[in-house]
Image: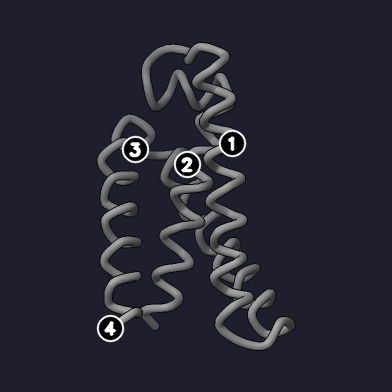
Amino acid sequence: MIFFVLIWSICAVAFFALASCMSKHQKQIFGRELTPSKTRLATFTGWILLIIALAICITHGSLSNMISYWIGALTFSALFVGLYLSYFAHKAKPLVISCSVIAILSWITYII
């Protein structure tokens, strides 16, 4: 269960970063549009986090099972981020911070 929380939280932060590169969501989350360099940074961060989540999945089991596991975590995190941005976009910053903390704590718990 903690492994799913780890993958889900990394994917959720990644999807929030990817949503931050769209001007509509930038206005919702930050109240203004970001500079092009910050938009590129958000895009890069989002894709890197998704690749990290995939790499963690692949290294912890058989390839076919873990890719399916990763796709399931992607589905749940995308649904969560989509619903959150639809109804509570102005409160996204604290949620991203808490998802990051959850990812770190679940990684520490998974290692132990």
Q: Can you identify the residue that label 3 sits on?
A: 92
User: Residues under labels 1 and 4: Cα distance?
Assistant: 30 Å
Q: Earlier in the sequence, mark 1 or mark 3?
A: 1
Label 3 amino acid?
A: Ala
User: Residues under labels 3 and 2: Cα distance?
Assistant: 8 Å
Q: In which quarter of the image is the C terminus?
A: bottom left
Nearest to the eye among marks 3 and 4: give it: 4
Q: Nearer the viewer, residue 7 or 76?
A: 7
Label 2 amino acid?
A: Phe
Tag of residue 31? none
Q: Earlier in the sequence, mark 1 or mark 2?
A: 2
Q: Crowding near pointer 2: few (<14 within 10 Å), some, many (20+)?
A: many
Give the x, y percent position of residue 46: 55, 43
Label 4 amino acid?
A: Ile
Instruction: Examine the rendered structure and indicate whether residue 76 appears above or below residue 86.
Output: below
Q: Can you identify the residue that label 4 sits on?
A: 112
Q: Can you identify the residue that label 2 sits on?
A: 16
User: Residues under labels 4 and 2: Cα distance?
Assistant: 28 Å
Q: In which quarter of the image is the N terminus?
A: bottom left
Q: Can you identify the residue that label 1 sits on?
A: 44
| In contact (CB < 8 Å): disc 1 and disc 4 | no
User: Residues under labels 1 and 2: Cα distance?
Assistant: 12 Å
Q: Which of marks 3 and 4 is nearer the N terminus?
A: 3
Q: Which of marks 4 and 2 is nearer the N terminus?
A: 2
Q: What element carries label 3?
A: helix
